Amino acid sequence: MHLQDILYGVSIQNLAGNTGREVSALNFDSRKVGKGDIFFAVSGTHTDGHLYIDQVLAAGAAVIVCERMPADLQQEVTYIQVESTAEALGQMAANYYGNPSSALKLVGITGTNGKTTIATILFNLFQALGYHTGLISTVQNQIDEQIIPSTHTTPDPLVLNELLRKMVDAGCSYCFMEVSSHAVVQHRIAGLEFKGGVFSNITHDHLDFHHTFDNYIKAKKAFFDMLPKNAFALTNADDKNGHVMLQNTKAQKKTYALKQIADFHARIVENRFSGLHLEVDLTDVFFKLVGSFNAYNLLAVYGTALLLGQDKLEVLTLLSNLNGAEGRFEDVPNQAHITGIVDYAHTPDAVQNVLTTIHDIRKGNEQVITVIGCGGDRDKGKRPVMAQVACDWSDKVILTSDNPRTEDPLAILKDMEAGVSPSNLRKTLIIADRREAIKTACHLANPGDIILIAGKGHEKYQEVNGVKHHFDDKEVLREQLNLIG
Ligand SMILES: CC(=O)N[C@H]1[C@@H](OP(=O)(O)OP(=O)(O)OC[C@H]2O[C@@H](n3ccc(=O)[nH]c3=O)[C@H](O)[C@@H]2O)O[C@H](CO)[C@@H](O)[C@@H]1O[C@H](C)C(=O)N[C@@H](C)C(=O)N[C@H](CCC(=O)O)C(=O)O
Ligand SMILES: Nc1ncnc2c1ncn2[C@@H]1O[C@H](COP(=O)(O)OP(=O)(O)OP(=O)(O)O)[C@@H](O)[C@H]1O
Ligand SMILES: N[C@H](CCC[C@H](N)C(=O)O)C(=O)O
Ligand SMILES: [Mg+2]
């Protein structure tokens, strides 16, 4: 492909060399660069791509996109200086793949919790409405029935645009994708054309990366700031920061809410283990999803579908039959007459929502036993709070490991334990081995009790020191419950 064509729309600060040349591929990892490639020198959290320029030139790179020009320039190489390499990478990746986002109705969903749930239900809904549809999410990426494993919530610009290209080629007219705050800050979505943006909520998470809650809010808001005039920006008006998201957007502003007047409104009539009974814009509907937090997710889906021109009654009829995403408030059937729930709650707010939901809908005074851990190499500030919330809303709590990554599991557990008040220590056990923790929870439970396994949801692995070992909460819980049943 011609370099000129890939450069379309990129603001260049300084240029050396020929821009009329052919290039083979785009690359931001020196270890993968081949002959004739463009190399993007991206400054990251661990290292800086600029340090590898000599290495990629030796490997045959033809074009260097950088933020600082190297001291000695090679004659046969083209150097392009830009203000942000990461942003240029997004724009050039979109050009390279023929701007697939503009051939789709692409809707991005952002927020601390609920992105996967909203994106997955939208995907299932639009498939049920008869459209070829794409999904980009934490659990998996999908092009109609084809499942493509996902490594990130929002992939890097090359993977992302390649996926969108495949969706267009497969005849998709819609794509629903999660937009993480990391992706906004790292410009993974630069160069994409969105038809809509949806905000779920913002609570404590990722402060290891954003440092302050204010920065975290700004990262989410930056997504709405980039939406064009012909797009819609749909926000949760009940969230304290819901309106902030729309402050500077050029897009058409829309709201959804349970507690106040909004463009899309619902009222919870009943919240049961079997599902939610809602009154949505004055129409009564039963849904399979459980918990008031899911009323927000359903309302976000409903609003999005209507803003995309779908018929209200058809949408509500189809929605009432759909399930949520894998590993989100998922019931694990068993022979022990114990209610086993696996949920991806990995923030204080999510843990509180799931446990208060269980609390509200349990029949009598069954015990609630929670097994919970926190991920390593991630926000340490949320650890004591997650433990505290788990204790406040459970009869027994077992603190255990999540994905320790490169951290010592016992050090993570110490951070969690610091949040347990002296009066709650009596009901708390610490068992670092997750399988043993789940087994113990099953032994502590009596028929009728409720066990919640929080934090890993759909994940099929436990990551320890860079190695992913097979681990599936649902599988272990089912196996242990059936052993005692
Ligand atoms: C913290 C973070 O977001 N890191 C992402 C980032 O990597 P990084 O900044 O650490 O990169 P780095 O190692 O410092 O390297 C800088 C640059 O030098 C290059 N390099 C590096 C070494 C070398 O020998 N040669 C070379 O060229 C790298 O390719 C990179 O371009 O850019 C990489 C390429 O896009 C991502 O894979 C990587 O995701 C890591 C694996 C990750 O775990 N990210 C998580 C935190 C994440 O992104 N999560 C979000 C949100 C989840 C949620 O919603 O809760 C997600 O969207 O998944
Ligand atoms: N609207 C919501 N408000 C608050 N909590 C929610 C909401 N929806 C889901 N949750 C809780 O958050 C957990 C994660 O939900 P989900 O996977 O949909 O969020 P996400 O934003 O995609 O998360 P991630 O950032 O990891 O991709 C759920 O398992 C549930 O406990
Ligand atoms: N997308 C989330 C996943 C957290 C899942 C939890 N199991 C953990 O490992 O901390 C994150 O990157 O923070
Ligand atoms: Mg997600």
Image (spheres, rainbow, N blue to C red):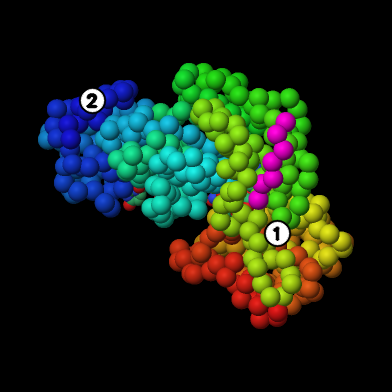
Give, as a three-letter code, the residue at label 1: Met
Mark 2 or mark 1: whose residue is earlier in sequence: 2
Tell me the quarter of the image containing the N terminus. Answer: top left
Q: How far across and down, in percent of the image, does residue 398 sit? A: 72, 67
Q: Amino acid at mark 2?
A: Leu
From the viewer's perspective, is 156 left or right of 355? left
Q: Which label is found at residue 416?
A: 1
Query: Mark 1: few, some, or many residues within 10 Å (few <14, many ≥20)?
Result: many
Drawn side of residue 281 relative to residue 227, left or right: right
* Magenta stretch secondary structure, dominant: strand
Query: Does 129 sit above or below residue 337?
Result: above
Q: Which residue in the protein does label 2 denote? A: 15
Q: Is residue 437 visible?
A: yes
| Residue 39 spot, x, y in % from top left | 26, 41
| Residue 111 visible in the displayed image | no
Please provide the residue range marked out in magenta: 282-288
Q: Is mark 1 within 8 Å of ligand 3?
A: no
Query: Relative to residue 461, is residue 436 drawn left or right?
Result: right
Q: Which residue is found at the position 45% from the left and 41% from the top?
A: 130
Outermost residue toward the bottom in this view: 483
Give residue 378's position: percent from left, percent from top: 57, 52
Quadrant where the C terminus is found in the figure: bottom right
Q: Which element is circle 2 on?
A: strand
Residue 215 coordinates in the image, percent (x, y):
59, 34
Looking at the image, residue 355 sits to the left or right of residue 69; the answer is right
**Residue toward you, 210 or 342:** 342
Disc 1 secondary structure class: helix
Residue 80: which numbered mark, if any?
Answer: none
**Along the line of sight, which residue is nearer the eye, 77 or 91?**
91
